[in-house]
Image (cartoon, grey):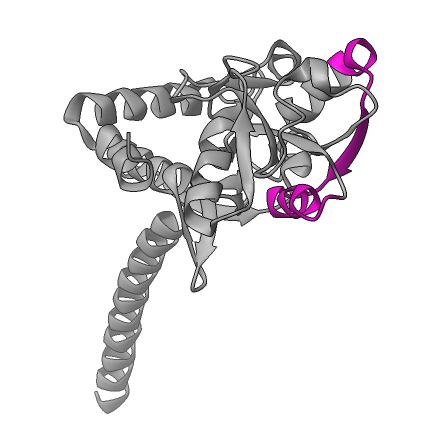
Amino acid sequence: MKKFGFITMLLALMLFMAACGSDEDTSSGDGESGSEEEVYQVGIDTTYPPFEYEVDGEYTGIDIDLINAIAEDQGFEIEFNPMDFGGIIPALQAGQLDIAIAGMSITDERKEVVDFSDPYFDAGLSLVVSSDNEEITSLEDLEGKTIAVKSGTTGAQFARDNQEEYGYEIAQFEDSPAMFQEVSNGNADALMEDYPVIAYAIAESELELKTVGDRLTGDQYGIAVLKGENAELLEKINAGLQSLRDSGEYDEILNKYIAE
């Protein structure tokens, strides 16, 4: 009888432990399911205020606030990956990024490799010279001069496309501050940069620079995903962008950084 009682108790203990293990497995499974929720990798260029820059170790700017708000509105998670602008599209192609938001102008050339969201900002290129330069007022004044551009940008492409017509030399840089400095120092005669970026830089940093002439292009910025691969994600981005416009949060974000 004692042996039978011992066996009964042992079986009961085994059943109890199995039940506990089942509960733990269920709990662990739920946790793993939550941890496996996809986090979209977002490529940014933090040398591009007021759209993307870093303050005290935190990313900030129009693009940062905008994609954060879109993600919150549409219920997905994101993680920022700062890099040189010229490396962003290659990183999308390599599968290292899911989303690119970096003051990226929508162009036919880029459309060959990425799909763009609806436009979220009207930009356009400006010609920029040192504040004491009275010689250069338009593209026609650039013959024999050197202009600074940022690699991989529409400014760099515009400069290449029009170099033969206007007869200038091109100096390429990896970030905007470097080319700003090149013109301020007199090592380059002019630069090409998106209007909101240079207007913000001149106002905030008191650069010895000024814009001249009319805007050279009528570019619009878009959020990019790899072409043909992320239709559902692009739909979420567009839906979130429209939601922000409808609620007024889009205007609040712009007004936070750019005073009209």
Number of labelled discs?
Answer: 0
Query: Which one is nearer the viewer's eye here, 190 or 121?
Result: 190
State the residue at coordinates (23%, 90%). 2
Could one spot residue 39 in this view of the protein? no
Q: Position of residue 239 (x, y in %)?
A: 30, 20
Q: Where is residue 166 in the image (x, y as percent from the top left)?
A: 77, 13
State the residue at coordinates (74%, 21%). 142
Residue 152, magenta (yes or no): no
Q: Position of residue 184 (x, y in %)?
A: 64, 45
State the residue at coordinates (52%, 17%). 215
Query: Which one is nearer the viewer's eye here, 131 or 127?
Result: 131
Please identify the quadrant where the N terminus is shown.
bottom left
Where, by quadrant of the figure, is residue 226 drawn?
top right
Q: Range of the magenta residues?
A: 162-186
Residue 164, magenta (yes or no): yes
Please identify the quadrant where the C terminus is shown.
top left
Query: Which one is nearer the viewer's eye here, 256 or 10?
Result: 256
Q: Where is residue 150 in the image (x, y as percent from the top left)?
A: 67, 35
- Horizontal side of residue 37 vs 194, given as left or right: left
In the image, farthest residue toward the bottom? 2
Classify 99 as above or below 60. above
Classify 234 as above or below 196. above
